[in-house]
Image (cartoon, helix red, strand yellow):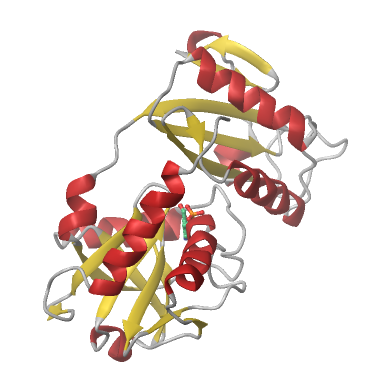
Amino acid sequence: TTMLWNDRLVKEEEIKLSIEDRGYQFGDGVYEVIKIYNGSMFTVTEHIDRFYESAEKINIVIPYTKDVLHKMVYDLIEANEIVNGYVYFQITRGSSPRAHAFPTPTPEPVFIAYTMKGERSIEKYEKGVKAKFVEDIRWLRCDIKSLNLLGNVLAKEAAQQAGCYEAIQHRGEIVTEGSSSNMYGIKDGVLYTHPTNNLILNGITRRVIMSLCEEIGLPFIEEAFTTGQAIDMDEFFMSSTSSEITPIIQIDDNIIGNGKPGEWTRKLQAAFDARVQQLGSL
Ligand code: PLP
């Protein structure tokens, strides 16, 4: 398949990455994942904006304008004829002899993008999934979509070892977010989710959900809740680019609500589907 290596569309075999790339040695870089529905990128502007924001927070200067990067990624999707799937891209600080501090002179950042084919996992959306509480042991800049994902990796692995689809991370009693998703509880007709600060990623799907809540008349309250409150919610769900809105019907041994995806959650899913249908061309 075709991939992007810096600003060039190349065959995978042509890509040469250095052992001393700081992404490889330090996780020193940032990334994005955008979902492609019927040949169009969903919320592409928001993802590209967040990519530049994440890069800026760690002082990586992306050597393209947003428009050029958008065009590059568009051309990649076209080259690979992706109808439904994903585009992944990342940028690292570049390559330099191994030393922790930023290298001088500043190396050329290394940009890579590739596509994946994939259909929506309808069964998960309809039946819901189980989740596991996992202590949030990550650093204090979870707002950066960093390549350093070890905490997230360990959380997801712990969930999967327990037969669960996702981890619900908590710092002390406070529920923060999933290993690669945001978390929401609904109680007495009100939706609660952790506020966007340094402890969670400001999800693009979360922003879509905020707008869908307004559309369907569900109050969206950015207020943290505890693990104890979480298991007492009427409905619970997670969101991400890949999982969209996935109901959570059980947390550890606790059944949420009646153990089926809730009414509000299903309304949100329907409103989300309608947004996807509205997608124009790229
Ligand atoms: N939180 C974390 C830690 C993530 O990695 C992700 C996405 O992968 C999300 C939340 C959800 O963000 P988005 O809706 O932009 O995919």
Q: Is residue 47 left or right of residue 179?
A: right
Q: Is residue 1 at all visible to an observer of this figure?
A: yes
Counting labels gives 0
Looking at the image, which is closer to me, 119 or 171? 119
Quarter of the view holding residue 160:
bottom left
Work out whether residue 144 or residue 65 is closer to the camera in this orientation and state it.
65
Above or below: residue 3 compared with residue 117: above
In the visual, does 266 lie left or right of 59? left
Quadrant including the N terminus: top left
| Quadrant containing the C terminus in the rendered view | top right
Where in the figure is residue 158, as x and y percent of width and height?
25, 61
Farthest-out residue, right? 105
**Quarter residue 184 falls in:** bottom left
Position of 89 relative to 188 (above/below) = above
- In this rendered view, identify the residue nearer to me: 37 or 202: 37
Residue shown at the point (31%, 90%) measured from the top left: 188
Q: Position of residue 73 (x, y in %)?
A: 61, 27
For image coordinates 19% across by 61% down, the residue present is: 128
Residue sitting at 51 percent across and 59 percent down? Answer: 208
| Lateral position of residue 246 relative to residue 65, left or right | left
- What x and y, as percent, mark residue 268? 36, 64
Instruction: Name the image quarter holding residue 218.
Output: bottom left
Residue beneath the point at 70% across and 20% down: 7
Left/right placement of residue 71 relative to residue 135 reads right
Residue 61 image position (x, y, % from top left): 80, 41
Judge whether residue 18 can be spotted in this image: no
